[in-house]
Amino acid sequence: MILVAGITASVLIQTMSSLQEQALQTGLETIRDVSAGLKVTHISGYANVSQIGQLAIFVAPIAASADLDLMQGYISLSDSTKRVILNYNSSCFNSSISNGLFNTLNSSHLNSNEFGLIVIRDIDTSCTSTSPVINNGDLVVLLINTTKCFSGIGTRTEVLGNVIPEYGISGVIGFTTPSTFTNTIVDLQP
């Protein structure tokens, strides 16, 4: 009887220990998912007379966010008739703006399911072409060739989407293009 009680107590202690470890892990994952994420700070478009051919989406980590690897995230984007999912293309990367926002990268190298990356601010130089990790204080631009994704984005078009990191809060994309494109650079979302 003492032996059975001892075995039962041992099983109960192991079960409680396992449940405690699982609860701790779940709690840490929940904290990470709630306290990390991206914010879209600004969106600009490069337009010709009738359509926007490129989008520049400025993103930064939210306050106190953990490091975010953009290689593990993606962009979901819709022009109201078609939805595309875009992944990072490491061959379309630049560590600074060298020839204007829309002329730094050759967006013709991007296809309908890829985005490029330009670093605006990276204090600890953690954002590289092979490991695009951003953290507190960083600001990057995600460049999309909308001509390949949607055959361009016309006037009065509603565009919706998200920049979705590996974990945490997604950055929101939402704007309607103007009725005419009078300037080459169009501010679309503040």
Image (spheres, grey):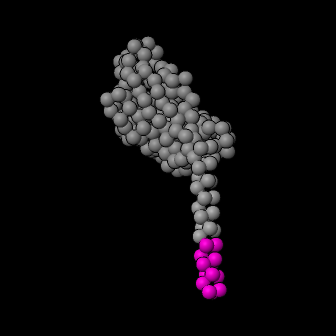
- The picture quadrant where one finds residue 95 is top right
Is residue 175 or residue 118 the one in the foreground?
175
Q: Residue at x 52, y 44 (%)?
A: 165
> Is residue 31 within the magenta segment?
no
Q: Residue at x 60, y 84 (%)?
A: 4
Judge whether residue 30 can be spotted in this image: yes
> Is residue 3 within the magenta segment?
yes
Residue interval drawn in magenta: 1-14
The x and y percentages for residue 101 are 52, 29
Q: Residue at x 62, y 37 (%)?
A: 62
- The picture quadrant where one finds residue 23 is bottom right
In the displayed structure image, the side of residue 122 where residue 83 appears, left or right? left
48 up-or-down from 93: above or below: above
The x and y percentages for residue 42 are 54, 27
Instruction: Check the picture and name the quadrant holding the N terminus.
Output: bottom right
Single out the residue that lies furthest toward the front: 1
